[in-house]
């Protein structure tokens, strides 16, 4: 066990339930011989995921002009990569008890980190870019849980960080006894996700991996750490150099050996892709 889930549950109450349908669907999609019918038979048990897939398949971007009325047809139209993202993002967004401004900002932050992590994975030669996407998506799942637990306390933390009262980690410990990173890692531990994803969530700020952590996990953590700065960097658009310097100063950039020209390339590609993905996932 990487994180002590029981202690966190005692403090915060039950953690979000495992998205059973999403996990089963992803497992089936790992089988190269799995049919669209088999995937559809699993996904149909979650109405939110089913509705989202059908709506996207019938959108102007993917529709061929004919009405797509079955999950099996929609799955064929969308393809495996997009299907995986839709299954996960629908499950993740569904964990919110409400969806106001705070939840929207958390969601945009998650999509931003996911998109940036996938771009960085390709840039850095990480062999699993879609795993990097998931690591970026889940990096702040603990914030979602804390916000659900007490919106008022979470709002005070956000405001306190902005006004310089303390770091998010210190203030989270003051209000909840745990940081969002610890809570997020506990959620992924409960969901039985891979150790690499749990560790990248737990250490995306402090970069303090165990000494025996695999090199590939270290690379994933560095990717998530650096990708996590892209959402905040958008607020520094007064000058491109501000964003570049802020990103280059992150620990993940040093571990990956990212250069200034590569940071510039990252920002340019990210801004183009994030604009598309943001519109898609917030629709």
Image (cartoon, rainbow, N blue to C red):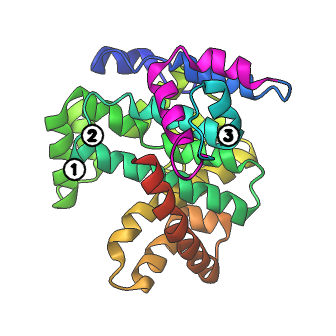
Specify whether 133 is left or right of 59: right
Give the image location of residue 268, x and y in percent: 55, 76
Q: Secondary structure at mark 3?
A: helix
Task: Compare residues 101 and 37 and report the one nearer the observer.
Answer: 37
Residue 158, numbered circle: 1
Q: CA distance from mark 3 to mark 1?
A: 41 Å
Q: Residue at (42%, 14%) from the top-left corner?
A: 6
- Characterize the magenta stretch by its predominant secondary structure: helix
Specify whether 264 is left or right of 14: right
Q: CA distance from mark 2 to mark 1?
A: 10 Å
Give the image location of residue 138, x and y in percent: 50, 40
Q: Secondary structure at mark 1?
A: helix
- Asked if the residues shown at circle 2 and circle 1 are in contact, with their CB atoms under 8 angstroms apart, the answer is no
Circle 2 residues within 10 Å: few <14, some 14–19, many ≥20? many
- Asked if the residues shown at circle 3 and circle 1 are in contact, with their CB atoms under 8 angstroms apart, the answer is no
- Is 58 a magenta residue? yes
Give the image location of residue 125, x and y in percent: 76, 60
Which image quadrant for residue 79? top right
- Asked if the residues shown at circle 2 and circle 3 are in contact, with their CB atoms under 8 angstroms apart, the answer is no
Furthest residue in direction right, as rendered = 33
Q: Residue at (65%, 21%) from the top-left corner?
A: 40
Magenta stretch, residue numbers: 34-63
Which image quadrant for residue 17? top left
Q: Which residue is mark 2?
A: 172
Task: Compare residues 216 and 273 and report the one nearer the observer.
Answer: 273
Give the image location of residue 230, x and y in percent: 46, 64
Q: Which residue is mark 3?
A: 77
Earlier sequence position, callout 2 versus callout 3:
3
Q: Residue at (57%, 40%) from the top-left corner?
A: 57
Earlier sequence position, callout 2 versus callout 1:
1
Earlier sequence position, callout 3 versus callout 1:
3
């Amino acid at each position: 066990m990487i994180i002590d889930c029981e202690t966190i549950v005692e403090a915060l109450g039950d953690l979000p339930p495992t998205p059973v349908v999403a996990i089963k669907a992803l497992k089936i999609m790992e089988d190269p011989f799995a049919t669209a019918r088999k995937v559809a038979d699993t996904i149909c048990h979650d109405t939110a995921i089913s509705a989202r897939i059908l709506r996207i398949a019938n959108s102007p971007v993917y529709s061929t002009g004919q009405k797509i009325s079955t999950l099996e047809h929609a799955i064929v139209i969308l393809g495996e990569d997009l299907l995986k993202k839709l299954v996960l993002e629908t499950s993740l967004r569904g964990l919110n008890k409400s969806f106001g401004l705070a939840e929207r900002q958390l969601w945009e932050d998650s999509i931003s980190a996911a998109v940036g992590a996938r771009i960085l994975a390709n840039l850095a030669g990480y062999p699993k870019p879609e795993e990097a996407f998931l690591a970026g998506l889940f990096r702040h799942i603990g914030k979602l849980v804390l916000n659900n637990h007490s919106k008022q306390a979470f709002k005070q933390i956000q405001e306190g960080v902005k006004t310089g009262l303390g770091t998010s980690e210190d203030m989270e410990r003051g209000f909840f006894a745990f940081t969002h990173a610890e809570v997020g890692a506990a959620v992924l531990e409960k969901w039985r996700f891979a150790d690499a994803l749990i560790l990248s969530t737990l250490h995306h700020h402090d970069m303090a991996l165990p000494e025996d952590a695999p090199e590939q996990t270290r690379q994933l953590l560095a990717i998530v750490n650096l990708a996590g700065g892209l959402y905040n960097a958008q607020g520094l658009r007064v000058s491109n150099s501000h964003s570049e310097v802020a990103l280059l100063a992150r620990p993940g950039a040093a571990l990956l050996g990212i250069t200034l020209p590569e940071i510039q390339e990252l920002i340019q590609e990210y801004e183009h892709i994030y604009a598309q993905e943001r519109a898609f996932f917030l629709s």
